[in-house]
Image (cartoon, rainbow, N blue to C red):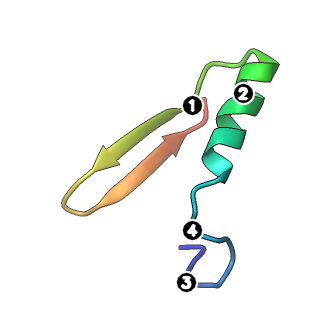
């Protein structure tokens, strides 16, 4: 979605940062779910 509006670099480099901050704060780790038909990736920040 961000690529469509030309925001973000599509490298996925922000995902490790998200996990790092969550770990530093002692929060429950985010979950990543991949689905097919339709293709989508869901990052749940609990």
Q: Are marks 4 and 2 in contact (CB under 8 Å)?
A: no
Q: Secondary structure at mark 3?
A: loop
Which numbered disc, 2 or 3, marks the residue that appears first in the sequence? 3
- Indicate which disc residue 10 carries: 4
Residue position marked by numbered label 3 in the rendering: 4
Image quarter where the C terminus lies is top right
Mark 1 or mark 2, which is nearer the start of the sequence? 2
User: SS at mark 1?
Assistant: loop
Q: Earlier in the sequence, mark 4 or mark 1?
A: 4
Q: Which residue position is annotated with label 1?
A: 30
In the rendering, at what x and y percent does residue 13 appear? Answer: 64, 53
Q: CA distance from mark 3 to mark 1?
A: 25 Å
Question: Could you say where residue 35 lies in the image, as x and y percent from the top left?
Answer: 28, 50
Callout 4 secondary element: loop
Q: Is residue 23 left or right of residue 32?
A: right
In this orientation, which residue lies closer to the viewer: 27 or 23?
A: 23
- Using a 10 Å C-alpha cutoff, classify the residue at mark 4 as few (fewer than 14 neighbours), some (14 to 19) or many (20 or more): few
Query: Relative to residue 39, is residue 46 drawn left or right?
Result: right
Check the image and report above or below for 27 versus 43.
Answer: above
- Residue at image point 59% right, 23% down: 29
First reached walking from the N terminus: tag 3 or tag 4: 3
Q: Which mark sits nearer the N-terminus, 4 or 2?
A: 4
Residue at figure coordinates x 70%, y 19% from the top left: 27
- From mark 2 to mark 3, how far is it between C-alphas? 28 Å
Residue 14 x/y as whole percent: 67, 51
Question: How many marks are shown on the rendered structure?
Answer: 4
Q: Earlier in the sequence, mark 3 or mark 1?
A: 3
Name the residue at 55% across, 84% down. 4
For label 2, the residue is 22
């Amino acid at each position: 979605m961000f690529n469509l509006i030309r925001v973000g670099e599509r490298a996925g480099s922000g995902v490790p940062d998200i996990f790092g901050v969550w770990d530093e704060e002692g929060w429950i780790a985010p979950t990543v779910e991949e689905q097919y038909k339709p293709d989508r990736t869901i990052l749940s920040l609990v």
